[in-house]
Image (cartoon, coloured by chain):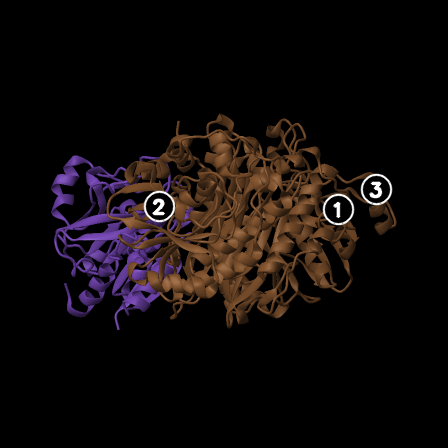
């Protein structure tokens, strides 16, 4: 958003004079919502961020969490919503580039990417073009830099036809003693490495901090262009520099470009900086102002001690990575910018880096009542047809059309691969069997109906997904995609989502170690698109060979459900796909059950009683069970009357309710008695509800009544190919 | 100890994976060698790993094939040093003229990452020493330009007389002619293949329904370097 008149007044006060054009541009870039978090900062303080294994919480480019003694995971999420709406290929690609560089700033090695995409209806031609571009952008960029894209989340909804949400996350790993946690000191050289600066992404962060204009083609100059080859060389060079402890501080030149990188690094350490723009390596002739705010990609700032400078330069030359030494940090507390000897900007670093936080008004809008609308007189439908509709829904069907375009194996760490489990499992790749699990989740429908409970449910679902693969959830990062913070009825959703995340993450003991906020996700008419809280979590895996996938393993094993099913069809995929309704009270978050059930699952798996695990999420219990059957290529029979329920009156409520804190587990045939004993011992509402068959069919009965029988190959075909069919026409 | 060179170009991204397998899984002495530092005379075997050398500019492998390192490599046939090109490494060997044919963009126009099955014909030479004729190996592919093309004459006169890897029916996802996944010189000294054996060298890496069969290629090399081939 361009600076407000009030902001211009405060800039004048800070400087004690009228700002120069360069200075004004620096303030505009840095005080943009994207860089400054001015509207969100007060609320984000509600999030729990600490725990004894959190080495570094929010504040730097990425946080660090110790997963095993001496080994840390660095992970972060980011959105590239606005650029992807204008230029889907470059917008999504540079999203990957940016998030990877955030991980590099702590000296970590990037080992996994996740893409969390909230996309339009594939049958809409504009949305289809955006989806193809976004996926190809991620594919081309991620594959080329050699970081596997191992997991994600995808949602399709007409509301995202013109303004998709493109959230990407990166996970890195480092020995604690190689983490770059020191800061710059006065006298350290400021070295800019990587791509030459050009006229792309001019004021991109400012562009991302206002609604999209009606004619998005005019904003193409604000979109950055990616160069994955340079990014890959940056990764290699930084691995070498950090392994030799040659740099003290690394910062990405992302949103806000050089201005943000220099002012934040100076402000964070109480320093100042002097830079000479004429030393910056350029792609084309630029004015000093353009150099300050260009968001050209694949550039990073290093703080290097003068005595180590020559060794650093030798390494940069060896990799043919271009660089320029543009100045140094000092103790002045001011950012002084020179161009050909002439002072073009002289601003206090702290005031530039941290504008006043704003208190935004918030008010629930009329439409929030949709989340309270009771569901009455739902017509009876054929349950077999309903299952077919749900299994073919792009929100449920296999995402292989997407993930097969991603190299998810490079790095030889991906033990549980896309489609094989509720979360990805990666090995550490040392001489142990240790690993980590990662997954990301959101449900735009839930958060648009009830932002507080919807966001809480995203945290809970992420937690369950990590539990399903037999990991111990450790921490999360969040991306809050919201509307216009200047409109109280849109800001309300943001506020409620933050509170929902804060509540659930405290309950589950998951610190929110970092995150990002994306505002101004409105359509061209000023309506907010579905506010979406995306959660990415990591878990510790003590033994990767004991990770559990979701595929059924063996005929005659039993299928059991863990957790009670309540009549909670509000906001469900069933209600939308089968009845065309998007309303009602969404499933209640149940943190206490989440914790108890997670412990129970862990126990079942570690004792070898449960051999596959799948959490129940959209589509409900029957869809979860069918997904396990498809993955394993084995038929199942399910007895609806054996499902533990409370308050349900109809079979569709039992089958398709999206009640939280539930799992489906495959119990070894020989261990079913033990399972039942443990259920009693733990006091868990759980029951055996069916069996794995030798025949390739899905049989669902209710007492003596046959509800439906479906051929597994047909259902598997729908599940595997529906998205492809929707995309390729 | 025999020494294996893993050549790294800007954009190579499977070098560390190949190093892990050659060194820690199979127990060979291996080093990643930056392409500018590469010279032929110090190595007993050479692997060009996968990735996007020089960002796949022009065509996959085209620029790497014209570096001094790869020009040097054309002497291997005289020196008898085994050379393996995996994925982008295969593309480099084809671009350099060390192996016949060409690798074109996948028929679907998209990058494909999936596990496949390939059948080995006429196994010979250092890389396939422990493989039997007709053995089926499971490995993953991950490429955008892996559709092998060869003209009929070359196919009949050369390719079918040399060791060959063919996608098993139903696994030719990129549209390769004659289902070809990998080709070699007549004596099998130089082998290039699109699937990634290094990603299929430990049991824990194989997804349900597949076996990690790529290890045999590295084990063959280890045995060959010790005992000849």
Corner quadrant of residue A680: bottom left
> Chain for mark 3?
A
Spatial CA distance of label 3 from label 2 is 64 Å
Q: Secondary structure at mark 1?
A: helix
Which residue corresponds to the image point at 21% horizontal and 48% vertical from the top-left?
Answer: B118
Residue A175, image x, y percentages? 50, 69
Please give the residue where the numbered disc 3 appears in the rendered image: A6
Mark drawn on residue A234 = none
1 or 3: tag closer to the N-terminus: 3
Where residue A527 sits, quadrant-wise, is: top right
Q: Residues within 10 Å of mark 2 (few under 14, many from 20)?
A: many
**Which tag is nearer the camera, tag 1 or tag 3?**
3
Residue A23 placement (x, y as % from top left): 77, 46
Query: Mark 1 sits on what residue?
Result: A27
Chain-order first, disc 2 or disc 1: 1
| Cα–Cα span, label 2 and label 1 | 62 Å
Q: Give the mark nearer the N terminus: 3 vs 2.
A: 3
Q: Which chain is purple?
A: B
For residue A51, above or below residue A405? below
Q: Residue at x 61, y 70 (%)?
A: A307
Secondary structure under tag 3 reads: helix
Residue depth check, mark 3 versus mark 2: number of the one nearer the observer: 2
Rendered residue at 51%/72% (across/down): A70
Chain designation of label 2: A
- B138 vs A674, left or right, is left
Q: Which mark is residue A638?
A: 2
Q: Cβ–Cβ below 8 Å for labels 2 and 1?
A: no
Which image quadrant is residue A331 in? Answer: bottom right
Circle 3 residues within 10 Å: few <14, some 14–19, many ≥20: few
Q: Mark 1, residues whose alpha carbon is within 10 Å: few (<14), some, or many (≥20)?
A: many
Which chain is brown in the picture? A
């Amino acid at each position: 958003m361009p600076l407000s008149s009030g902001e211009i007044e405060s800039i004048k006060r800070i400087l004690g004079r009228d700002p120069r054009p360069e200075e004004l541009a620096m303030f505009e870039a840095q005080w943009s919502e994207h860089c400054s978090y001015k509207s969100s900062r007060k609320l984000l303080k509600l999030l729990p961020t600490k725990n004894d294994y959190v080495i570094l919480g929010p504040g730097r480019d990425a946080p660090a969490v110790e997963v095993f003694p001496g080994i840390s995971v660095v992970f972060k999420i980011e959105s590239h919503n606005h650029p992807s709406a204008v230029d889907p290929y470059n917008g999504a690609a540079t999203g990957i580039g940016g998030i990877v560089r955030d991980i590099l700033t702590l000296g970590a090695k990037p080992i996994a990417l996740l893409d969390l995409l909230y996309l339009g209806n594939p049958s809409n031609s504009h949305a289809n073009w955006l989806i193809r571009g976004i996926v190809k952008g991620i594919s081309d960029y991620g594959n080329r830099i050699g970081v596997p894209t191992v997991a994600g989340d995808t949602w399709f909804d007409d509301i995202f036809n013109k303004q998709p949400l493109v959230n990407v996350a990166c996970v890195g790993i480092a020995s604690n003693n190689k983490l770059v946690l020191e800061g710059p000191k006065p006298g350290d050289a400021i070295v800019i490495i990587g791509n030459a600066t050009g006229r792309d992404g001019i004021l991109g962060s400012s562009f991302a901090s206002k609604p999209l204009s009606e004619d998005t083609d005019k904003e193409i100059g604000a979109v950055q262009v990616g160069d994955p080859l340079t990014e890959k060389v940056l990764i290699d060079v930084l691995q070498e520099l950090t392994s030799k402890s040659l740099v003290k501080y690394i910062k990405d030149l992302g949103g806000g470009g050089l201005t943000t990188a220099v002012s934040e690094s100076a402000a964070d350490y109480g320093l100042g900086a002097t830079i000479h723009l004429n030393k910056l390596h350029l792609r084309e002739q630029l004015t000093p102002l353009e150099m300050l705010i260009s968001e050209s990609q694949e550039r990073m700032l290093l703080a290097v001690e003068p005595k180590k400078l020559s060794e650093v330069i030798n390494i940069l030359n060896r990799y043919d990575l271009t660089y320029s030494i543009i100045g140094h940090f000092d103790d002045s507390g001011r950012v002084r910018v020179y161009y050909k000897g002439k002072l073009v900007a002289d601003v206090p670093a702290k005031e530039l880096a941290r504008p006043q936080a704003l208190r935004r008004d918030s008010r629930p809008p009329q439409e929030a009542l949709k989340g309270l609308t009771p569901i009455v007189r739902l017509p009876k439908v054929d349950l077999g047809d309903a299952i077919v509709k749900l299994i073919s829904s792009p929100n449920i069907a296999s995402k292989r059309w997407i993930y097969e375009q991603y190299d998810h194996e490079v790095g030889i760490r991906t033990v549980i691969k896309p489609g094989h489990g509720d979360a990805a499992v990666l090995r550490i790749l040392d001489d142990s069997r240790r690993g980590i699990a990662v997954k990301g989740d959101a449900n735009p429908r839930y958060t648009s109906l009830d932002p507080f409970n919807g966001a809480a449910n995203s945290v809970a679902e992420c937690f369950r997904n990590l539990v399903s693969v037999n990991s111990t959830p450790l921490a999360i990062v969040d991306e809050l995609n919201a509307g216009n913070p200047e409109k109280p009825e849109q800001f309300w959703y943001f506020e409620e989502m933050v509170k929902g995340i804060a509540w659930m993450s405290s309950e589950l003991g998951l610190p929110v170690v970092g995150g990002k906020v994306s505002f101004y996700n409105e359509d061209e008419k000023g309506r907010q698109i579905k506010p979406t809280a995306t959660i990415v979590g990591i878990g510790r895996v003590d033994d990767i060979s004991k990770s559990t996938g979701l595929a059924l393993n063996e005929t005659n094993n039993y299928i059991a459900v863990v957790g009670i099913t309540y009549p909670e069809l509000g906001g469900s995929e069933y209600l939308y796909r089968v009845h065309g309704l998007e309303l009602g009270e969404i499933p209640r978050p149940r943190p206490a059950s989440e914790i108890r059930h997670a412990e129970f699952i862990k126990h079942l798996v570690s004792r070898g009683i449960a051999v596959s695990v799948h959490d129940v999420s959209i589509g409900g219990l029957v869809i979860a069970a069918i997904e396990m059957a498809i993955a394993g290529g084995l038929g199942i029979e399910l007895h609806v009357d054996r499902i533990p329920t409370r308050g349900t009156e109809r079979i569709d409520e039992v089958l398709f309710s999206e009640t939280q804190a539930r799992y489906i587990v495959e119990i070894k045939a020989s261990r079913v008695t033990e399972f039942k004993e443990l259920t009693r011992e733990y006091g868990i509402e759980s029951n055996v509800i069916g069996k794995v068959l030798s025949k390739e069919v899905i049989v669902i009965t209710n007492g003596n009544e046959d509800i439906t029988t479906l051929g597994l190959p047909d259902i598997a075909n729908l599940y595997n190919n529906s998205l492809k069919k929707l995309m390729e026409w | 100890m025999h020494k294996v060179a893993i050549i790294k170009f800007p954009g190579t991204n499977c070098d560390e994976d190949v190093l892990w397998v050659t060194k820690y899984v199979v127990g060979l002495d291996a080093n990643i060698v930056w392409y500018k530092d590469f010279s032929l005379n110090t190595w007993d075997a050479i692997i060009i790993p996968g990735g996007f050398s020089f960002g796949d500019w022009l065509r996959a492998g085209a620029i790497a094939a014209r570096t001094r390192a790869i020009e040097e490599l054309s002497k291997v046939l005289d020196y008898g040093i085994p050379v393996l090109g995996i994925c982008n490494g295969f593309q480099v060997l084809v671009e350099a003229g060390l192996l016949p044919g060409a690798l074109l963009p996948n028929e679907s126009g998209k990058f494909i990452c999936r596990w496949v099955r390939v059948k080995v014909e006429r196994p010979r030479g250092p890389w396939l020493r422990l493989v039997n004729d007709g053995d089926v190996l499971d490995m993953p592919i991950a490429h955008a330009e892996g559709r092998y093309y060869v003209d009929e004459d070359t196919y009949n006169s050369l390719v079918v007389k040399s060791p060959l890897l063919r996608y098993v029916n139903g696994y030719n996802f990129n549209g390769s002619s004659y289902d070809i996944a990998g080709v070699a010189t007549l004596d099998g000294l130089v082998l290039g293949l699109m699937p990634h054996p290094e990603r299929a060298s430990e049991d824990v890496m194989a997804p349900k329904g597949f076996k990690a069969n790529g290890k045999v290629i590295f084990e063959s090399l280890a045995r060959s370097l010790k005992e000849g081939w």
